[in-house]
Image (cartoon, rainbow, N blue to C red):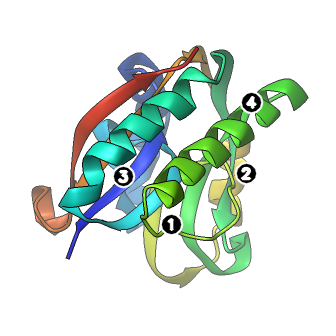
Amino acid sequence: MGQRMFVAVVPPLVVTEHLDAFLEPRREAAPFRWVPVDQLHVTLAFLESVPERRLDDLVERLGAAASRRTPFETRIAGGGAFPHAARSRVLYAGLALGEEERSSLERLAAGTRTAAATSGIEIDGRRFRPHVTVARIGRPTETSNWVRLLDAYEGPAFTVDRVSLVASHLGEGPRGRPRYEIVDTFPLG
């Protein structure tokens, strides 16, 4: 069995702390599993099982994929819920993306997924939807008020200038949550 990993844009701490400070006074109003500030990220590719023997090839290909993309600016803004607000399982913050930035992020995600697939690693086939998961919800729950609250949020701008390969160690974090470990970081451009 391989290592559970994902490729992500990890915003700077000042950005995730801003979002965390916005959510903090409101969290006790809902019994959601809130994502800790140091785990907030935008997943580009989810890799359920990376065999050790494929890791070097993956790292090399991710570096090449990142180097073909140009840095761009965005901010965490707005929000939503999966699958939808009436029966949510996930609450998320969105990203402020103009047409050019959206295209850049989608190409970056496609490049990281191609790098993984070409390395012989199976990837989650779901369509890429840029978001930052802020909470997981045990059973489907009505979250329209939370989505409206997040819709009013706009964080500080930041430059997407790198992607990270992150190992997810299930159950090793506080209160049985996953522990994330950045394995490598790849600069854009």
Q: Is residue 156 left or right of residue 60?
A: right
Helix, strand or loop for disc 2:
helix
C-alpha gap between disc 2 and disc 3: 19 Å
Residue linked to disc 3: 35
Of 78 and 142, which appears nearest the observer?
Answer: 78
Q: Secondary structure at mark 1?
A: loop
**Residue at 20% over, 67% down:** 170
Residue at the image point whose x is 62% and y is 42% from the top? 111
Specify the label residue 123 is tagged with.
1
**Numbered label tally:** 4
Residue 138: quarter of image: bottom left
Task: Point out residue 98 in the picture as x, y percentages from the top left corner.
Answer: 85, 27
Using residue 18 as the reference point, say whether residue 94 is left or right of it. Answer: right
Tell me which amino acid carries mark 4. Answer: Ser
Q: Looking at the image, can residue 178 be seen? A: no
Residue under numbered circle 2: 148
- Which residue, given by chain and number where applicable, does mark 4 sit on? 104
Q: Of callouts 4 and 1, which one flags the residue occurring earlier in the amino acid sequence? A: 4
Give the number of the mark in front: 2 or 3. 3
Which tag, 1 or 2, sits closer to the chain's start? 1
Measure how far apart labels 4 and 1 are at the Cα level.
20 Å
Mark nearer the N terminus (1 vs 3): 3
Report the front residue among 10 and 186: 186
Give amino acid for label 1: Ile
